Amino acid sequence: MTNSILFPFLLFALYLLTPTVKAEIKSLKVTGDNRPMILFEKFGFTHKGFASVAISSVSVTSGLSKPDPSRIGFFLLSEESLNQVLMELERNHSPCVIDSKFISILFTFKDLASSHHSSINKSYPVGYPGEYFLLFANCNRGSLVSMNVRTELYNIDDGEHRDYLSVGQSQLPSIYFIFSVIYLCFLGFWIHECRKNRQYVHRIHILMAVLLVMKALNLICASEDKHYIKVTGTPHGWDVLFYTFQFFRAVLLFTVIILVGTGWSVLKPFLQEKEKKLLMIVIPLQVLANVASAVIDENGPFIKSWVTWNQLFLLVDLICCCVIIFPILWSIRSLRETSKTDGKAARNLAKLTLFRRFYLLVIGYLYFTRIIVFALITISSYTFEWVSNGAEELASVVFYMMMFYMFRPTDNNDYFLVDDDEEKEAERYLQALEFEL
């Protein structure tokens, strides 16, 4: 078997570990493409699913020999049949996936030749529920394909209305809306707390309120985006608002974690030079991460650089997650050194305990949203894809609430109020115990 045929299927095996693509109605243009396989969509069908593909302005050229139109076409491949197709191709000496008995052919370019047209529109009912790949195969080596492609994947469970969201994502509009209401209520409570303790409000508390606003708006736009895709197949402009607020939310979240970790405006009114440099690193990285996320979501695996964009997003996200830990560690180290000289052992012990808990909280949040959520995506059935999204949002709510509670506006003197006995006890504790991270 040639590597050019097997290699795309290895990519598909990796793609099984990623979430289902947004299956809104898509119009794509293929220009001079020589890939033997192109993955257009991944979608979860019910027993009343449909796949519709329309192509126009079709052109196939080759510098070697005349292309065989029966070896070029679109087909559906179920996730369950992927391994069988791979084994079947390994057994054949001259493999072409279109010949496989484990796929569902929509049409081949032979249908174009017989109709004497350069366009075709086919719809295929999916009677067996499952998660499917919509793929294009070109088994003519060295040939270049150009065409305009329009895809529609949907379910009609009630026999009347189309649902353009994969069966496992159909609940997402409601989930995102519920969480947006939770954040709006949280914002109202935070504003109430800030007004009640107005004399203890710092600039960081205002920035935290803005973060809640961005998070709520981001979820509202996500809910509307998914709702319109579900009902009409197109986001009606909500995707632009979603990516806009997602960008501001992501930048603000990492900024707030860094500023809280440094103790800015609460423990000190200014940032040190190294902390400013850290922000100048994180903000551009977050811009890059959000651009990569938008490219991945909007184009899907259709584009040639899809894998590269995925790797870029994962790398940038990993760097940002590592970077935001440093300010917390710096604060802990600074407090440990200060506690030995300023004679305020109990107060410094309280601050040390607070920042150590915050450090563990951030580590737990990053671990859950990056590792546990990925594991849920991997092991969950295609009908329960919404579980990983719900778990991620629930973890975010818990993280926000705990972070905001730890650094709520309060009287520092009352918060760290200690008597002489506590002061002596804290001195002995700090001398006997080293804070290990």
Image: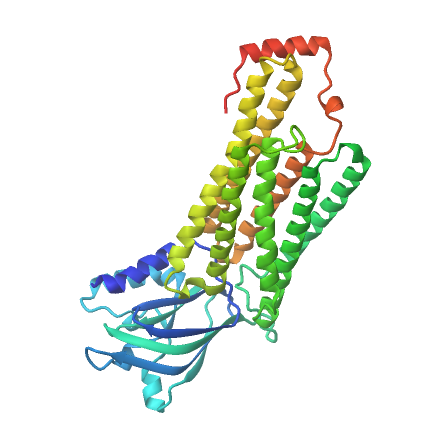
| Residue 285 image offset from top left, x and y in percent | 49, 47
Quarter of the image with the N terminus is bottom left
Which residue is located at x 52 percent, y 70 percent?
154
| Residue 418 image offset from top left, x and y in percent | 72, 15
Residue 102's place in the image compared with 52, above or below, is: above
Number of on-image labels: 0
Q: Nearer the viewer, residue 108 or 49?
A: 108
Q: Is residue 236 left or right of residue 84?
A: right
Q: Is residue 51 left or right of residue 263?
A: left
Residue 102's place in the image compared with 366, above or below, is: below
Instruction: Please identify the residue farthest to the front as the structure is shown.
Output: 273
Res. 38 image quadrant: bottom left
Instruction: Please identify the residue farthest to the bottom as the structure is shown.
Output: 116
Q: Nearer the viewer, residue 275 or 164?
A: 275
Which residue is located at x 61 percent, y 69 percent?
236
Residue 180's place in the image compared with 42, above or below, is: above
Inspect this view and state whether residue 47 appears. yes
Inspect this view and state whether residue 50 appears. no
| Residue 314 image offset from top left, x and y in percent | 44, 48
Q: Nearer the viewer, residue 435 or 86?
A: 435
Res. 430 image quadrant: top right
Q: Is residue 180 left or right of residue 120?
A: right
Res. 419 image quadrant: top right
Colour pattern of the rendering: rainbow
Instruction: Please identify the residue farthest to the right as the structure is shown.
Output: 196
Which residue is located at x 54 percent, y 14 percent?
433
| Residue 113 image offset from top left, x and y in percent | 32, 87
